[in-house]
Image (cartoon, grey):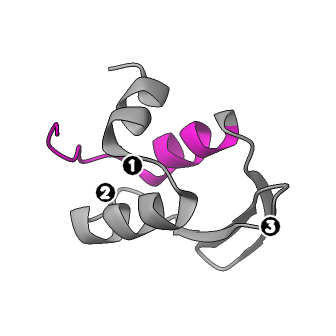
Amino acid sequence: MPPLPVIKASQLIRALEKVGFQALRQRGSHIRLKHEDGRVLTVPLHIGQDIGRGLLRKILRDAELTVEELLELLSY
């Protein structure tokens, strides 16, 4: 398994939109994304900060994505 990358929230949101998640709403610095099958995610959008590896792993688990799939979506 490749190492988990350090990415910005905007990069993660773009990758999640590629697999069918849509921005539902934003409250403060958190964006709520929903998939058509019912999965819901919250992504913190703090300008100038990266998403921590632990939080990224949790978001990927909730989105039912693997690290490999994320890397492919980010087109590294």
Residue 60, given in percent of the width and then of the height, sits at 44, 58
The tag earlier along the polypeptide, 2 or 1, is 1
Q: Residue at x 31, y 57 (%)?
A: 50
Which is more toward the observer, 60 or 47? 60
Separation of residues labelled 3 and 2 (CA atoms): 27 Å
Residue 76, given in percent of the width and then of the height, sits at 32, 20
The tag earlier along the polypeptide, 1 or 3, is 1
Q: Is residue 76 visible?
A: yes
- The reply to whether callout 2 and callout 1 are in contact (CB within 8 Å) is yes
The amino acid type found where label 3 is placed reads: Gly
The amino acid type found where label 2 is placed reads: Asp
The residue that disc 3 covers is 38
Q: Secondary structure at mark 1?
A: loop
The image quadrant that residue 53 belongs to is bottom left
Q: Secondary structure at mark 3?
A: loop
Q: Was residue 6 drawn as part of the magenta stretch in this picture? A: yes
The amino acid type found where label 1 is placed reads: Lys
Q: Residue at x 36, y 31 (%)?
A: 71
The residue that disc 2 covers is 50
Q: Residue at x 48, y 40 (%)?
A: 11
- Using the image, tell me which numbered label, if any, was put on residue 8: 1
Given this view, does label 1 or label 3 mark the residue nearer the observer? Answer: 3
Q: Residue at x 52, y 67 (%)?
A: 62
Q: Is residue 5 left or right of residue 71?
A: left
Magenta range is 1-17
